[in-house]
Amino acid sequence: MESVILRINGPVVFADGMGLAGLGEQVDVGDEKLAGEIIALEDDVATIQVYEDTIGVKPGEPVVARSEPLSVWLGPGIVRSIYDGIQRPLQKLFDYSGTFLERGLSTPGIDLDRTWAFTPTKTIGDTIVSLSILGDVPETDLIVHRVMVPSGMSGNLTWIAAAGEYTVTDVIAKVETAAGEREITMLQKWPIRRPRPIAKRLPPRVPVITGQRVIDFLFPAARGGACAIPGGFGTGKTVTQHQLAKWSDVDMIVYIGCGERGNEMTQVLEEFPVLKDPRSGKPIMERTALIANTSNMPVTAREASIYTGITMAEYYRDMGYHVAVMADSTSRWAEALREISGRLEQMPAEEGYPAYLASRIGDVYERAGRSMIEDSDGTTREGSVTIIGAVSPPGGDFSEPVVTHTKRFVRTFWGLDRDLASARHFPSIHWNTSYSEYDVSAWYAEHAELPWAELREKTKALLKEDEQLQNIVKLIGADALPDKQRITIETSRLIKEAFLQQAAFSEVDSYCPLEKQLAMIDIILSFHEQALKASAEGKPVHQLLSAEIVEEIHRMKEAIPADEMERFVELKRRVEAGF
Ligand code: ADP
């Protein structure tokens, strides 16, 4: 029976005669063959979400099922690309149709004509297992693409191409499997909603070092972890994400822009390609794939974009790379879920979001992970997908559904604070609302000279005490407090201003290596100890707090660059010498 459109409701289309199709199957909708996906099936009627504008599509037009789930193309060429939510290269689409996206253009996500320099790393006769690396392709200046055997395939290598230039559809290897000989190309497909399996999962115990003190020192992210950055408008989500993209010690970034307004996305499209990778001096795009949902795309593409991006990240993870996925913002993505759910006339739950909002958010963050893959020759490689989701709750309200559900699935929470932002305390990640539950202490104990865990505990305790004291100060003023507490307040002020504040646009301080971070906090905590000691010996507190060394501590982040660490040693010596 031919399948035809019955009814159209915005990006949602209902089609009859779909009995043979399956849930999640990709379909071509209407005469223009718009890309769609079956999201519900009842008897013979399929509910289809269409990833393109449905204006002009009429009931009675045909619907053709493609017998495969909505998938992404995986192969060299992903890095440096700018895609839409279903992996259509934006540049290509712009080329074809000017600034407005034409519909039904099935442009492949990977360039099929371009050739790549393939160098084999296996030889004929080798045993191969799932995800064995067959060879390398220099994909960009910063990423070497590892050409892998498709997930799940194993056998014997009966043929492999010599080093040379190949397109992604050229056969580069043949494998004798239990089910016969298989040809392998550099191009693979993977359904976006199915996580790529992790053969051996490693615990998320290695921090992602970001060079941002409030993150690395107080609330570290872990490789393979899930993090959220919630914050109202203007609190610094974009700047923080850019800082993370630039400085994090990961190999690759997948940036998923779910901006609602066109100009938000234009901003990303303009800003990202000019960002520089500070370590190599190359454009950051050399290790980035960008997914952009522009305003003239339907919400359905926004819904899919997160899965498209994560699937790409998992593929590079399997190659042995540490990948950070940044989704900005998941609130816009959740709004897409709400809108689609509304079109489906589903019963709304909290604030109009569908009842399955929490499980969808969970599905996304659960794809974060750190993995170890063993190749047939015994070599192992580690990779990870770290997911960092920005959340932009209306009015900066952290009690709304997207933030509260996100909290159930992430273990690092960087709460951006409006008051801090208006006081120009940046990053405005608040020490009271933020947390990180990843246990990275063993890594720090091994890699840092100073005792991170101990310094961190002391710092947190001081900030906590300060918070309580601030309430008293509001009532009776600081002068009425005992000396010990005044010293706590002053040390906390140093922690907040001299340590936690970090200007993204400062040449010296934009990135702060771990060694410098720990040296700085160590000095502040030494100051605390020395001030307590001096006050116990009867020195007047106001004199201690106005000492010149306090000013020096204030200035150290800017005044002492990371390559002059001996100056921190010297500063600490002077602090320890007392006042
Ligand atoms: P959002 O994306 O949450 O709306 P932005 O990231 O655009 O907010 O930040 C708003 C402004 O705050 C920026 O233009 C910048 O002036 C300031 N800002 C945010 N983070 C920092 C930072 N780490 N260092 C210096 N300024 C910052």
Image: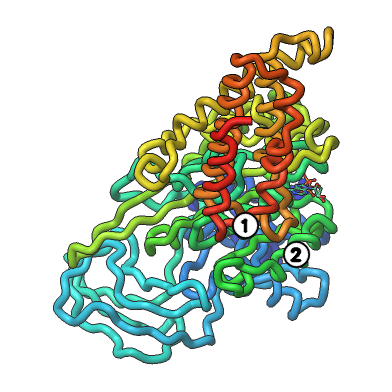
- Which residue type carries mark 1? Pro
Residue carrying label 2: 271
Real-space CA distance between mark 2 and mark 1, rounded to the nearest whole angstrom: 27 Å
Q: Nearer the viewer, residue 547 or 232?
A: 547
Q: Amino acid at mark 2?
A: Glu
The answer to whether one can see residue 24 in this image is no
Q: Position of residue 195 (x, y in %)?
A: 44, 49
| Total numbered labels placed on residues in the image | 2
> Does residue 571 appear left or right of residue 179 in this picture?
right
Q: Is residue 477 above or below residue 12?
A: above
Secondary structure under the numbered disc 1 in the rendered image = loop
For the residues carrying marks 2 and 1, which lies nearer the camera in this image?
1
Comes first in the chain, label 2 or label 1: 2
Residue 457, position as x, y percentages in the image: 50, 26
**Quadrant location of the N terminus?**
bottom right
Quadrant for the C terminus in the image: top right
In x, y percent, where is residue 533?
Answer: 57, 20
Q: Nearer the viewer, residue 102 or 514?
A: 514
Bin the neighbour count of mark 1 within 10 Å (Cα to Cα): few under 14, some 14-19, many 20 and up. some
- Residue visible at 76% across and 30% down in the picture: 546
Disc 1 target residue: 561
